[in-house]
Image: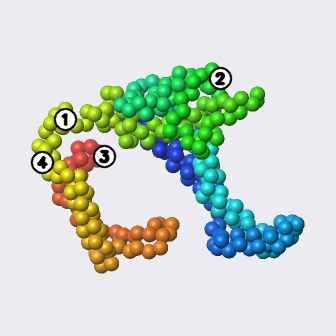
């Protein structure tokens, strides 16, 4: 339950950050068509009048409004969008979610069977050691900071920052956010597991101890072929059959309407007619009312 809570909370932080970033940037967003043509016009005008100003040379060819739309489009889909999401994520984590996530580190014991994922475990240990240092902005200069897969190029620019003396330091809260993001991904595929858990236990315990020696018997009990290519072919054929049946049936369904996506979605189902109330339910309501209903 606690592991599920951790995973869901980290996912919720990310989803909330993406939603807020989209709402912030969507007001400026306007997709610009014919970018190749616009680029050609800008290049041609620049070559013809290399000594002219942007206002004199570029604006008459493309237009200031179009250039602003291009900038807004780039912000809404490029690195600026990712940076906005990360900034929103850090703010949500620091102001609210951190108080609930940090205590879980002292309750849950994370492990891994692969040394490649050890840096995330070391990062969690580091976060736990400084969990009570509420006023600490950077980790101490002499501290070893594990670098893990969650700190990609985008996160690196936020995690590492120069202090007033020009020294590169690690921002503690941003490092925690990136680490929890990495932990969530590795928990979901059981690259990292939790000691004493059931659903999130050691993946080596998911199979019977004698599975390899009795593989044929176990596969027969599951009614699955030993050859993986045969299994894939069966799944693929079943998927194609079902998708074809759905494709043939959709146009003739009277209760289904598929239209352009709007505020209420592209798929609309006609509400089903109400069924008559079951006799047993009427009897149950009568008995409940007689025993616990208002006294006359």
Say the numbered circle drawn on residue 208: 1
User: In the rendered image, which residue does mark 3 sit on?
Assistant: 294
Image position, residue 172 (x, y; %): 60, 30
From the viewer's perspective, is residue 282 above or below residue 58? Answer: above
Sequence-wise, which precedes: disc 1 or disc 3?
A: 1
* Measured Cα–Cα span from mark 4 to mark 1: 15 Å
Q: Are marks 4 and 1 in contact (CB under 8 Å)?
A: no
* Measured Cα–Cα span from mark 3 to mark 4: 60 Å
Residue 286, visible in the rendered structure: no
Sequence-wise, which precedes: disc 3 or disc 4?
A: 4
Q: Are marks 2 and 3 in contact (CB under 8 Å)?
A: no
Identify which residue, 115 or 182, lies in the foreground: 115
User: In the rendered image, which residue does mark 4 sit on?
Assistant: 220
Identify which residue, 93 or 82, lies in the foreground: 82
Sequence-wise, which precedes: disc 2 or disc 1?
A: 2
User: In the rendered image, which residue does mark 2 sit on?
Assistant: 141
Q: Are marks 1 and 3 in contact (CB under 8 Å)?
A: no
* Residue at point 17%, 58% (across, down): 279
* Measured Cα–Cα span from mark 4 to mark 2: 59 Å
* Residue at point 69%, 66% (across, down): 69
From the viewer's perspective, is residue 289 above or below residue 110? Answer: below
* Measured Cα–Cα span from mark 2 to mark 3: 70 Å
Question: Mark 1: few, some, or many residues within 10 Å (few <14, many ≥20)?
Answer: few
Image position, residue 281 (x, y; %): 21, 55
Describe residue 273's horizontal placement relative to residue 181 as left or right. left
Colour scheme: rainbow
From the viewer's perspective, is residue 13 above or below residue 99? Answer: below
Label 3 sits on a secondary structure element that is loop
- Determine the image quadrant of residue 46: bottom right
- Determine the image quadrant of residue 67: bottom right
Question: Mark 2: few, some, or many residues within 10 Å (few <14, many ≥20)?
Answer: few
Label 2 sits on a secondary structure element that is loop
């Amino acid at each position: 339950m606690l592991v599920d809570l951790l995973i869901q909370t980290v996912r919720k932080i990310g989803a909330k950050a993406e939603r807020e970033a989209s709402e912030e940037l969507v007001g400026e967003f306007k997709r610009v068509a014919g970018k190749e043509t616009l680029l050609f016009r800008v290049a041609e005008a620049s070559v013809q009048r290399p000594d002219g100003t942007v206002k004199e040379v570029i604006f008459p060819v493309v237009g200031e409004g179009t250039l602003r739309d291009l900038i807004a489009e780039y912000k809404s889909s490029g690195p600026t969008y990712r940076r906005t999401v990360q900034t929103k994520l850090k703010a949500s984590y620091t102001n609210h979610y951190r108080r609930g996530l940090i205590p879980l580190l002292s309750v849950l014991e994370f492990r891994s069977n692969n040394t490649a994922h050890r840096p995330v475990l070391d990062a969690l240990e580091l976060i736990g050691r400084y969990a009570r240092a509420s006023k600490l902005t950077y980790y101490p200069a002499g501290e070893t900071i594990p670098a893990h897969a969650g700190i990609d190029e985008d996160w690196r620019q936020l995690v590492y920052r120069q202090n007033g003396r020009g020294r590169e330091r690690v921002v503690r809260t941003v490092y925690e956010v990136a680490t929890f993001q990495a932990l969530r991904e590795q928990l979901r595929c059981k690259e990292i597991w939790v000691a004493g858990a059931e659903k999130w236990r050691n993946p080596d315990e998911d199979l019977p101890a004698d599975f390899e020696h009795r593989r044929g018997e176990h596969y027969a009990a599951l009614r699955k072929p030993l050859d993986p290519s045969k299994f894939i072919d069966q799944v693929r054929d079943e998927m194609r059959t079902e998708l074809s049946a759905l494709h043939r049936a959709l146009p003739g369904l009277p209760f289904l309407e598929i239209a352009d996506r709007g505020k209420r979605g592209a798929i609309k189902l006609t509400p089903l007619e109400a069924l008559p109330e079951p006799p047993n339910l009427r009897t149950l309501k009568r008995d409940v009312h007689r025993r616990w209903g208002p006294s006359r």
